[in-house]
Amino acid sequence: MKYPTITKDSFEQHAVKPNLPDYHTMYREFSWDTVSNDLDWFDKEHINIAHVAIDTHVATDRRNKKALVWESKKGKVEEYTFLDLSRLSNKFANVLVKELGVRQGDRVFFVLERVPEIFIAILGTLKAGAIIGPLFSAFGPDAVKDRLADSEAKVLITSPALKKKIIEILPELPALQKVILVNRDKGPVDPDDVLYETMMSNASDSFDTVKTHKEDYAIIHYTSGTTGKPKGAAHVHQAVMGHYATARYVLDLHEEDIYWCTADPGWVTGTSYGMFGPWSNGVTQVVYEGGFSAKYWYGFLERMKVSVWYTAPTAIRMLMKSGDELPQQYCFDTLRYMCSVGEPLNPEAVVWGVKIFGKAFHDNWWQTETGCIQIANYPIQDIRPGSMGRPFMGVTATILDDHYVKELPPGEEGHLALMAGWQGGWFMYHTGGGAVTPTTKSIDLAQRLDQRSKILTNIFPIASHILRSEPEFFYS
């Protein structure tokens, strides 16, 4: 079924003016140097994601602004300002460096529920110059073992309950030296367990953040493994430029927004847009500890006065299945903008958003390998339901034939490719393959293929470097 285009108000008619007033002009004139100037570098070669996301704001009037508002499964609410997160992450950095002997470049992994400690510990790890590796807390022992072994993780942060689930694989990880337990519920632990709470109580809240080079690795995220063996994608500290810019122009985050990203911190969306994107923009974000519940989610949107919401197509479809009557019991007056990522967003879900919330879900596309959004629908542009949108500024996208050489004309199905000008070749995204270029020149995702990332015929490791490509205007 073909759905009509969803038209938008003009820029002047928006109550909150979009950060991107004119896509075409911005795409032509965009420069990553301008983005770089917005961020707090130590010098022209050194930057640290945690410093940009948190400590930068401590020197401004945002220091006492709420950065994180967390709600537990039982309804308990905890609030943390940027100053709070700065001090607490400093304490954890001291735990790693002074107590555990963690050095720059060491891998520190996380198998932890969606609790404040995972945010604090991730920031502290980055400040220490170590590399974070967040894993989905629902992973089984084999999935955890594969990733910890592959990365040669030195430290693991988990909880007593999750440790019990994976305890059998720990002796099979020779590189793993320490397991730290976050014991929020104060449950029984073994006498030799290393407790997060004890170590943090003795740590100083003063720490000199490691001045990491822009090309130093910061993050390892593993692909889901749904179409092949999971692969680790490493991202550098300079990737924060992409987090910041896409959160500003795609998610359209403003100073006064209350933002909710439903992604788990164990996935790339949960770090890029559940931490670094919103916080580098100085935005307050809310987090719910629990899983999906249509009733609870609607209440959370209303209660937290969420203004920008980023969620997954699967969650949207589950909300649809819960019926149209339930959301009518709630007020969504503060909700102004909604985005989605994870898998293709079906047109019906986009249209349903307009029916229920009075606004459409904006689909976008990226992958674990890219680290941030590459193709998107934007607040200033009309939406064609079923389309991923247009390339982000600084990104060149096209559709190639089966030989990965010839660009295909609009309307033909082929393989989605991204170009990085610094490398001079096409990044082949078989995971996003089967893309279509309709006559509107926006891009549809037809199907997933395998999980190889290629430049022409050569396998190439995808990091965050793609964000340094200069803009070339292929699709407008």
Image (cartoon, grey):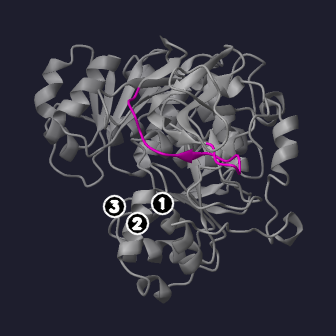
Residue picked out by circle 1 = 346
Mark 2 vs mark 1, foreground winner is 1
Q: Are marks 2 and 1 in contact (CB under 8 Å)?
A: yes
Measure the C-alpha gap from mark 3 to mark 2. 15 Å
The mark found on residue 272 in the picture is none
Measure the C-alpha gap from mark 1 to mark 3. 22 Å
Give residue 49's position: percent from left, percent from top. Answer: 61, 31
Q: Residue at x 17, y 30 (%)?
A: 192
Q: Residue at x 19, y 47 (%)?
A: 161
Mark 3 vs mark 2, foreground winner is 2
Viewed as shown, does residue 333 lie left or right of 142? right
Q: Which residues are magenta?
A: 437-451
Viewed as shown, does residue 102 lie left or right of 5? left
Against 353, residue 226 (above or below) is above
Q: Residues within 10 Å of mark 1 (few under 14, many from 20)?
A: some
Using the image as rendered, state which of residue 197 and residue 426 is in the foreground: 426
Q: Residue at x 62, y 16 (%)?
A: 215
Residue picked out by circle 3 = 291
Q: Quadrant of the C terminus?
A: top right
- Ranked by sequence position, the earlier of labels 2 and 1 is 2
Residue picked out by circle 2 = 317
